């Protein structure tokens, strides 16, 4: 497995950005989705539901 995705609402997105930033996790935002790596190198995508 190379990638896993889950959905988020607009409110959850701001919470996710805050949490990733507070925990110094590098992430990218592309077309409304947030992408970051888990400790094993798996890419996690949090994508907008709206």
Image: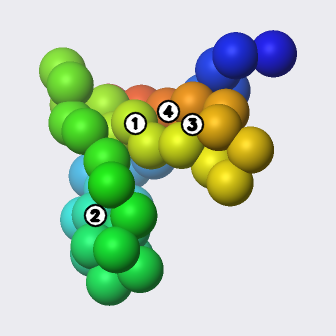
Horizontal and vertical percent position of residue 1 = 81, 16
Task: Identify the mark at residue 45; answer none if there is no mark.
Answer: 4
Comparing 35 with 12, the one in front is 35
Task: Identify the mark at residue 44; answer none if there is no mark.
Answer: 3
Question: In the displayed structure, would residue 18 be above or below residue 13?
Answer: below
Residue 42 showing in the rendered view = yes
Horizontal and vertical percent position of residue 4 = 67, 26
> Regarding mark 3 in the picture, which secondary structure is present there?
strand
Furthest toward the front, the residue is 40
Nearest to N terminus: mark 2 or mark 3: 2
| Separation of residues labelled 2 and 4 (CA atoms) | 12 Å
The residue at which mark 1 appears reads as 35
Question: In the displayed structure, would residue 49 be above or below residue 17?
Answer: above
> Label 4 neighbourhood size at 10 Å, few (<14), some (14-19), many (20+)?
many
| Separation of residues labelled 2 and 3 (CA atoms) | 13 Å
Task: Identify the mark at residue 26; answer none if there is no mark.
Answer: none
How many numbered circles does the render carry?
A: 4
| Separation of residues labelled 4 and 3 (CA atoms) | 4 Å
Residue in view at x 74 percent, y 44 percent: 40
Q: Is residue 28 left or right of residue 25?
A: left
> Label 1 neighbourhood size at 10 Å, few (<14), some (14-19), many (20+)?
some
Label 4 close to label 3 by CB (< 8 Å): yes
Residue 7 showing in the rendered view = no
Which of the 4 image quarters holds residue 13?
bottom left
The residue at which mark 2 appears reads as 17
Furthest toward the top, the residue is 1
Question: In the displayed structure, would residue 1 be above or below residue 27?
Answer: above
| Quarter the C terminus occupies | top left
Nearest to N terminus: mark 1 or mark 2: 2
| Separation of residues labelled 1 and 2 (CA atoms) | 11 Å
């Amino acid at each position: 497995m190379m990638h896993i995705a889950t959905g988020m609402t607009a409110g959850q997105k701001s919470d996710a950005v805050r949490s990733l930033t507070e925990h110094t996790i590098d992430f990218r935002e592309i077309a409304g989705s947030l992408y970051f790596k888990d400790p094993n190198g798996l890419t996690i995508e949090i994508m907008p539901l709206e």
